Image (tube, rainbow, N blue to C red):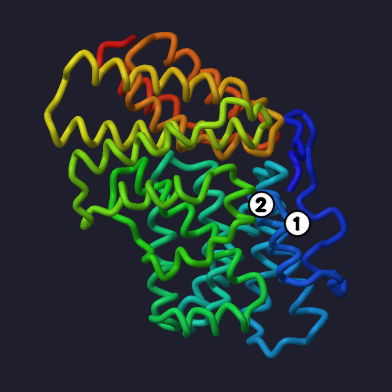
C-alpha cells in the first residue's frame, strides 16, 4: 500500500455507493478487498458493506436474522459516523443490539461482524484500553465453531471477510492487553489470521508485534537478559533513513517494543541505575519525536495510540508529556474524534510520578 492520506478536516464517507438496502454485485475478491481497504474505522465499515453486498448478490443461504444483523449494524455504524444523537439514532442502536443478541443466542458466526462493529466504536469512543468485553464475547462465540487451525481455516473460507474481522479483534486484543495490563483473550491460533498487508496498513512490523505478544503473555516467563536482548534487537532495526509515514510509524512501534521490554526488565531486576533510566528516557524521547513527525492526516496516525500511551507510561520529562498531549489532542480534533479519556489517563500517571 502507498502512503495514502486521510485529511482530518475532510469527512470521508465510509461507503459512498452503498446503503444497507442496496444490492450491488461485488467486483473484487475477498483477498483484494483485504489488501485495498485500509485498517481503520472507515475501512472496517467498508468491509462490512462489502460483506453485505456479497450476501445480497450471491444469495447466500443465511438465516433472516443474520442478514438483518448486517443491515442494521451498517445503519448503526453510519449513524455513529454522522454523529447523530436523536431518536432515530437511538432506535438504530437498539435495533442493531437486539438483532446482535438474537444472532449470538443462535450461535451463528455472522454475529462476529456485529460484535466487531461495536468493538471498534468502543475502541474509538470508550475508555482507552477497556474494550475487552466485546472481545471476550467474540472469543466465546468463536470457540463454538473452531478449536483448531483446520477448523478456523474452514470457517474463514466459508464466510468472506471473516478473516479481516478476526484480524481487527486480535489486534484490539493485543493493544488492550498492553494498555489495560490484562491477559490476552485470543490464542496464537487466532493471531495467524494477521497478514503482512494488515501489519503494513497499521505500520507495525510483524516481529515487533510478536515481541509485544510475548510481553503481554502473562504465562510466558522471559528473563531480564532476554528482555534486554529483544529490546536491543528492536533498536538495531530502527531505520533512521526512512522518513515516510510508514517508516516513522514502524520506528515508533520498534521504540515502544524496546521501551516496554526494558521497562519490564527493570521491574524484574528492581534496577533504578542512572544508565538504565537514561536509556529508557532516550527511547521515550525517540518515540515522542517519531509520533510528532507523523502528520495527523496520515492513515497511520490513529494507529499510534497504543504506542503513545505505553510511551507515556514511561515518560520522565515535561517535554515528553507535552509531545504526547499534542497527539491526544489531534486525535480528538480529527474527522471522527477518538480516544476521549486517553490523555486524562496519562495525566493521572504523570501527576502520580510528579512529572507535572
Where 171 falls versus 348 (above or below)? below
Of pointers 1 and 2, the one earlier in the residue sequence = 1
Measuring 47% from the left and 25% from the top, which residue is drawn there? Answer: 287
Query: Which quadrant does the C terminus fall into?
Result: top left
Where 153 falls versus 273 (above or below)? below
Q: How many marks?
A: 2
Q: Residue furthest left?
A: 270
Q: Residue furthest front?
A: 236
Residue 36 got which mark? 1
Mark 1 is surrounded, within 10 Å at the Cα level, by few (under 14), some (14 to 19) or many (20 or more) other residues, namely some
Residue 177 got which mark? none
| Depth check, front residue: 195 or 183 | 195
Q: Position of residue 50 (x, y in %)?
A: 75, 67
Measuring 74% from the left and 63% from the top, which residue is drawn there? Answer: 33
In front of the other: label 1 or label 2?
Answer: 1
Q: Look at the numbered disc 2 and give the secondary structure of its residue.
A: helix
Residue 55, picture quadrant: bottom right
Q: Look at the numbered disc 1 and give the secondary structure of its residue.
A: helix
Q: Left or right of 23: which side holds 152? A: left
Q: Position of residue 347 (x, y in %)?
A: 37, 20
Where 179 falls versus 218 (above or below)? above
Measuring 27% from the left and 36% from the top, which residue is drawn there? Answer: 228
Q: Position of residue 349 (x, y in %)?
A: 30, 23
Mark 2 is surrounded, within 10 Å at the Cα level, by few (under 14), some (14 to 19) or many (20 or more) other residues, namely some
| Depth check, front residue: 193 or 60 | 193
Determine which residue is flagged by label 2: 89
Amino acid at each position: 500500500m502507498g502512503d495514502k492520506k486521510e485529511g482530518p478536516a475532510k469527512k470521508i464517507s465510509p461507503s459512498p455507493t452503498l446503503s444497507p438496502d442496496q444490492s450491488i454485485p461485488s467486483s473484487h475478491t475477498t483477498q483484494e478487498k483485504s489488501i485495498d481497504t485500509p485498517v481503520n474505522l472507515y475501512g472496517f465499515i467498508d468491509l462490512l458493506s462489502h460483506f453485505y453486498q456479497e450476501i445480497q448478490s450471491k444469495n447466500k443461504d443465511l438465516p433472516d436474522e443474520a442478514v438483518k444483523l448486517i443491515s442494521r449494524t451498517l445503519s448503526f455504524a453510519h449513524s455513529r459516523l454522522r454523529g447523530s444523537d436523536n431518536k432515530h439514532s437511538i432506535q438504530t442502536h437498539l435495533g442493531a443490539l437486539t438483532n446482535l443478541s438474537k444472532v449470538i443466542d443462535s450461535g451463528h458466526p455472522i454475529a462476529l461482524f456485529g460484535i466487531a462493529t461495536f468493538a471498534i466504536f468502543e475502541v474509538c469512543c470508550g475508555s482507552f484500553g477497556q474494550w475487552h468485553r466485546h472481545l471476550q464475547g467474540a472469543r466465546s462465540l468463536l470457540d463454538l465453531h473452531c478449536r483448531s487451525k483446520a477448523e478456523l481455516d474452514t470457517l474463514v473460507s466459508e464466510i468472506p471477510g471473516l478473516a479481516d474481522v478476526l484480524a481487527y479483534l486480535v489486534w484490539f486484543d493485543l493493544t488492550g492487553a498492553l494498555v489495560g495490563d490484562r491477559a490476552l483473550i485470543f490464542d496464537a491460533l487466532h493471531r495467524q489470521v494477521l497478514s503482512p498487508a494488515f501489519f503494513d496498513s497499521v505500520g507495525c512490523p510483524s516481529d515487533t508485534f510478536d515481541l509485544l505478544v510475548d510481553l503481554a503473555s502473562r504465562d510466558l516467563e522471559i528473563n531480564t537478559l532476554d528482555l534486554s536482548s529483544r529490546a536491543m534487537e528492536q533498536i538495531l532495526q530502527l531505520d533512521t533513513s526512512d522518513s515516510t509515514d510508514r517508516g516513522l510509524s514502524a520506528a515508533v512501534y520498534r521504540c515502544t517494543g524496546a521501551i516496554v521490554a526494558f521497562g519490564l526488565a527493570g521491574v524484574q531486576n528492581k534496577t533504578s541505575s542512572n544508565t538504565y533510566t537514561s536509556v529508557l528516557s532516550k527511547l521515550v524521547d525517540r518515540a515522542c519525536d517519531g509520533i510528532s513527525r507523523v502528520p495527523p492526516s496520515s492513515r497511520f496516525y490513529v494507529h499510534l495510540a497504543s504506542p503513545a500511551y505505553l510511551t507515556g507510561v514511561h515518560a520522565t520529562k515535561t517535554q515528553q508529556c507535552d509531545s504526547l498531549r499534542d497527539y491526544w489532542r489531534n486525535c480528538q480534533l480529527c474527522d471522527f474524534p477518538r480516544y476521549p479519556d486517553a490523555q486524562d489517563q496519562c495525566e493521572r500517571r504523570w501527576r502520580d510520578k510528579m512529572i507535572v
